[in-house]
Image (cartoon, grey):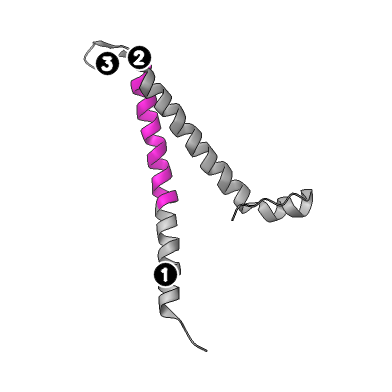
Amino acid sequence: MDIDLSSIFSSSLNVLLTGLVLGAGLPLLFSVGIVLADRGAGGELADGSVAAPNPAAKHGARAIFVLVALIVLYGLLFITRKSISHYLGIDLPLG
């Protein structure tokens, strides 16, 4: 039995990077969306001054939230693709 250490290392690195991107990157992206939504809303600041709403920040926040929702939806469909295929007869080409 031959053990290919480079293949094991490469696969482990792929799992690690995917875990970092989805485990830390997605919540980070969501928090950037929260900050943009706050800046886009305007209102009273901590020092008592008033900030005008920022439409660009609002739209940026919405785009980020849509992206995060699509990534989560893709993940759910990827995880349940075999059950969907078995029970509903729908084959999802998700990778």
* Kind of residue indicated by mark 1: Ser
* Observer-nearest of 5 and 30: 5
Query: Is 49 on the left or on the right of 94, as rendered?
Result: left
Q: Residue at x 71, y 52 (%)?
A: 91
Q: Is residue 50 magenta?
A: no
Tally the numbered discs. Answer: 3
Q: Is residue 11 above or below residue 57?
A: below
Cα–Cα span, label 1 and label 3: 49 Å
Task: Please report the bounds of the magenta region as a residue range.
Answer: 21-41
**Residue under label 1:** 10
Q: Does dot 2 land on a helix, a strand or a loop?
A: loop
Q: Residue at x 42, y 79 (%)?
A: 5
Q: Is residue 41 above or below residue 25?
A: above
Q: Is residue 43 above or below residue 67?
A: above
**Residue under label 2:** 53
Quadrant holding the C terminus:
bottom right
Q: Which mark is residue 45?
A: 3
Q: Of all residues shown, which one is farthest toward the bottom?
A: 1
What is the x, y in percent for residue 38?
Answer: 36, 23
Cα–Cα span, label 3 and label 2: 12 Å
Query: Is 47 on the left or on the right of 59, as rendered?
Result: left
* Kind of residue indicated by mark 3: Leu
What is the x, y in percent for residue 35?
Answer: 35, 29
